[in-house]
Amino acid sequence: MTTKVSACWQKNPALAWREIDEVTVIISPTDSVMHELNDTGSFLWKNIDGRRSAAELAELLAESYEVAPEIALIDTQALLEEMSSRKLVMPVPATGGELR
Amino acid sequence: MSSGAAAGATPVMDRLISRTVLKHQPLSVHFDLTYRCNERCVHCYLDHDDHGELTTSECLSVMEELARAGTLFLTFSGGEIFLRPDLYEILAAARRLHFDVSLKTNALLVTEERAAQLREFGVRRVQISVYSDIPEVHDAITKVPGSLQRTLAAIPLLLEQGLQVKLACPLMRENLLAYRGVMALAERIGVPYVLDLTITPMMDGNEGPLAHRIPVSSLLPVMQDPLLHACKPQPSAEAATAMKEYPAAVGSAVSSGMESAAYEDLPCSAGHNSCYISPYGDVYPCVQLPQAAGNLRRERFSDIWYHAPQLERLRGIRESQLPVCSRCRIRSYCERCPGLALMEGGDLLGAYERACELAEQKARLAGVFEPISALHKERAASAPQKVLENEIAFFVTSSSSD
């Protein structure tokens, strides 16, 4: 993980997505690839708003899924890294402000 | 495009379709923004006069309702969508609401600046109607001199912006021999194409456009053409690559999904997880099934979608229970459309001549011995009975007049 846990995350604004039946389906218009997020991924996706950091997202995850905070943080960071590598999410630039 | 096989439903798409069919969620919506058009195609099924299109704010409200209902795939079409002065406002809202947006257009009004705007608003795909690579043939169908040249000039502008372009070529009497030219053109440009044999009556039932339909007997050379890949769209190079790069549940290329097993015993997706909205707010199961289920100026989308009797009835139809077609032994060669069954045969559940003829022709080409559809068998069986009835009637008449 190269991004600090305090960095905030935002969704890639170019994506099309919908939560259908508790599963989030995301389409990248640039390469037409469909991504499907499972329950935990969908939970994180819903809460990624450009203002929450990995640590804060992990906190929400720990509360909702009743898992130990340190496990939740590891899972959150892994999921963010995975989603970031697929260009679904990105860290908010340090100068602040969500990308439009 | 070239020689790639048709893209099958990907695992992600398959699961999405299964879930939405099962729960009747409107995954895909075809939204015609206008019936006005700057071409006058000879086979068109639309009345191009404006009878009171939805306003910008009405369109935006409809889209908000669709997003809430779970629609992901949104296709804007017409008429010619670029004739809507508020098109970009609508596209901006579509992006804000996270739809996957496709457009259908003749591209006459596409400029470099407009192509860039489409990109900016996140449009993924643009389908463009091209009837021939020969200007005289194309322009005679659109009735707009110079239209092929203008349409083709737009394609590189869209491709430069990274948009996916697909050529759509409805085949009719006027351009039957032009399909190979369209295929070659698509190959040259490097885009997929789709050839479409469907020419439908007008939405008000007027059968004028059917005069342009190619008789099945004349389609034989087309159906036998080894260059033709069953008239199905081919995956774009990017999508094909994406399918290889992202296997299984991680990510996969978007396909039409019509091959999905979830549709197995259903006539099609109409009313199950897709529908059509007219520029006047009428909600239909499909553009080819003109039975309005409700109007969005009077009712909410979710009320229409979940409670309209027309849609509930449609959802109850199973191919295996169709009165005639379920008994047809060449059913697997048939592309029966419930809408056309209604418009041409007068019965949503019935068989209709065109589908039967096409299925027989396809089955014959596939080597089936004496392929006869259930409809034609039924007619043949009832013919001697009719003759007998007529003869008895004549006898009775003759006897009573003696």
Image: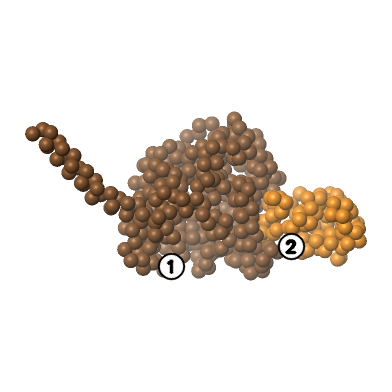
Chain colours: A orange, B brown
Where the C terminus of chain B falls, by quadrant? top left
**In x, y percent, where is residue B374?**
36, 54
Residue B189 seen in render: no
Q: Is residue B240 above or below residue B214?
A: below
Mark 2: give few (<14), some (14-19) or many (20+) Cα within 10 Å.
some
Instruction: Specify the label residue B338 is tagged with.
Output: none
Callout 2 touching callout 1 (CB < 8 Å):
no
Residue type (three-letter) at the residue carrying disc 1? Leu
Residue type (three-letter) at the residue carrying disc 2? Arg
**Which residue position is annotated with label 2?**
A86
Q: Quadrant of residue B397?
A: top left
Residue B239 seen in render: yes
**Which residue position is annotated with label 1?**
B227
Q: At numbered mark 2, what does the secondary structure look like: helix, strand or loop?
A: loop
**In x, y percent, where is residue B399?**
11, 36
**In x, y percent, where is residue A60?**
87, 52
A49 vs B152, nearest the viewer: A49
Residue at 54% x, 37% y is: B309
Give me the C-alpha separation between circle 2 and circle 1. Answer: 37 Å
